[in-house]
Image (cartoon, helix red, strand yellow):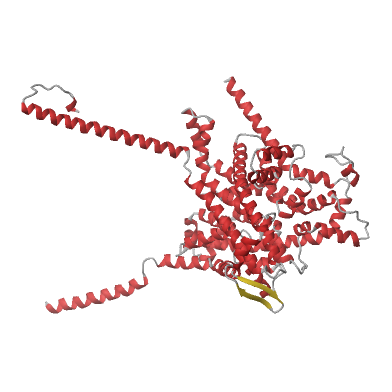
Amino acid sequence: MEETKELTKAEKKAQKKALKERMKHLKSGKLEKRDGRMGLFFMIPWFIGVAFFLAYPLGTSIWYSVNNIRTLPQGLMFRQVGFGNFTQILQSDPDFIVQLVDYITSTVLSVPIIVVFALMIAMMLNMKIKAKGFFRMIFFLPVIIVSGPILTMLTEEGAGSISAIDMNAITGAIQSFLPPMLADPISDLFSNMITTLWYSGVQILIFLSGLQKIDKSMYEAAKIDGGSGWECFWKITLPNVKPMILLNVVYTIIFISSNSTNPIISLIQTSMFSGDREKGFGYAAAMAWLYTGVIIIIVALFALVLMTRKDAYEKQVKRAKKAQKMEVRKRKKIERRNRRNAKRIEHQRAQGKITSRTTTRDEY
Amino acid sequence: MGTKDKEGFLKQFIVYALLICIGFIYLYPILHMLSTSFMTLDDLLDSSINWLPSSLNFSNYRQAAGSMDYWKSLVMSVIIAGVPTICNLISCSIIGYGLARFNFPGKMICMGIIIISYILPSQVTMIPTYVLYSNLKILNTLWAFVLPAIVGQGINAPIFILIFWQFFRQIPKVLIEASKIDGAGYFESFYKVALPSGKPAFVTVALFSFVWYWNESYLTNIYVHGIGTSSTWTSLVIQVQNFATNYSTYSSTAVSGATSLNESINMSGTMLSILPLLILYLILQKQFVESIDRAGITGE
């Protein structure tokens, strides 16, 4: 008996060993791991690209920005200046500061205009109208031809604004009752209205495809409940296109910032190739970093405003929840009072002050 | 019922009126350019002529084309826009597929870097990249555009990667699994299943990449055309940028008896430079306009 038992024990051990051996090849999640490895394999070009054309230039650019660099025939000559470039730009380069302030005000002003305009056009195109394709074609056309030199040429030749509308009257009116800080960018905006509107081609299409995805039955339901078109816009359309608004705002900011009509980037270019001892690659790199910082701040600002803003629907839900909570609290209060009263009556009855049931309240 | 119909009519009327007005404003610069480009000097000075030139005058176009070296610039423009576009298509589709199909550690970080690299302006990496190119001796050659495009860092490449990612994500996994059961490897399932079904994404990316590279003047100027030492590379947009100087050298040397630079010649030059894209757009406008819809940029 004992022998057989031992034998079976040995057998069991062997079996276990064999199973373990086999399990080694059948590790769970092995396919996933291999999939992951393949994913990394597909990403190899991107990793190379990030290393050579993003990480390396970014790091070097930081290094450049704290150096004064001179281009000599033998190569680049570095001299560390710490934050010298930055202080020099901020303190003694009036051009850059003026352009930067101009850029900030004009971006902050024109981005909402472009996005709202794009939304309006998209909503009109989303209605039941004829020749939809034709209008869509017109509104997308500028995307094809908009480029720095062409725009400069057009504005120079006076095609940037319509001559039939007297722009001088409008800008004059604006300048008369607004402080010059605000009036200048706004009147600039008016005189270049067409080119500003031209930037909204892609945004219109993004909004349009977003609007087409909204379920039509929602509008019907709202109409049955007596909602007006105005209410439908705030409570159905806007919440539904909200993600696209953020997308469009970011796209617009980046587009304006990298457009070659932007004076700052040409300023960076001229200081990069300037023969000035103080300027050069290091100085331009510092400028580029300041510019980047401003862009990131603007994007963050818009993102913050758009993400925290609650729409009408959310507000209503919140209000309803609040009202519900109040109701519950009130009911609990009444219940507590009833219980208290019942106790008191019980107590009084026990003392013999009341003989009959006088209140019906305690049956609550 | 009657009042409702009336209201509908009024609304329709307002919408059409607005659309036509705004459409006119949109087209105004192009129409202005077109009409001015045909005017002779007399027409320009005559204040009674606003829109229609007295005669179709093609000499402006001839002179502008001559000063821009039109055909050569056109071919170069096509190459400068076309070759990086092909590289973009290859690299961004591979990268987008990698992001959409596989799960690997650090995927979210990769997505974050892609979005950040879109927000960062190209100026911040421009100076070291310029030095890098000049060390590699590829400055003022087409390689300066091709090299980053091959590894998915071309102009606006983050957008293209995201378009491909969005698109390949929508392909049902079952399709790829089925191909796997039929014995297809990872690469086979990529180029036999994913690529053929990703055709709309390819069209979108090809069109936008081409247009954006075509219209890029800033980086073309620095990397390919060259700032101080002008290389042989040029593009139509760059030619418009340097139109005045080009024209003055042309008119001083030409035997064709070119007139001095005026508004009409400026406008004809501009018109000539946008004409190829305009024709491309008129032919492919459906692809362009529906591209954003189909590529699913707005998907969740």
Please tell me which residue is depicted at 76% across the width and 66% down the height of the picture: B233
User: For the view shown, which residue lies furthest in the front direction?
Assistant: A91
**Percent x, y of residue A358:** 14, 21
Q: Is residue A360 visible?
A: yes
- Where the N terminus of chain B falls, by quadrant? top right
Give the side of residue A35 with respect to residue B33, left or right: left
Q: Quadrant of residue B69?
A: bottom right
Q: Residue at x 19, y 76 (%)?
A: A9
Q: Quadrant of residue A296?
A: bottom right
Q: Say above or below: B42 vs A285.
A: above
Residue at 40% over, 36% down: A319
Residue B129 visible within the image: no
| Image label count | 0
> Vertical placement of A364 versus A91: above or below?
above
Q: Position of residue A311 (x, y in %)?
A: 48, 40
The spot of residue A40 in percent (x, y) is: 50, 67
Q: Which residue is more in the foreground, B289 or A231?
A: A231
Return the residue found at the far top. B2
Q: In the displayed structure, does residue B31 sit left or right of residue A22?
A: right
Query: Which residue is nearer to you in this view: B79 or B225?
Result: B225
Rendered residue at 73%/37% (across/down): A169
Question: Can you give x and y, in whole percent of width and height, for residue B267 in the image?
Answer: 81, 50
Q: Nearer the viewer, residue A95 or B31?
A: A95
Q: B194 and A285: which one is in front? A: A285
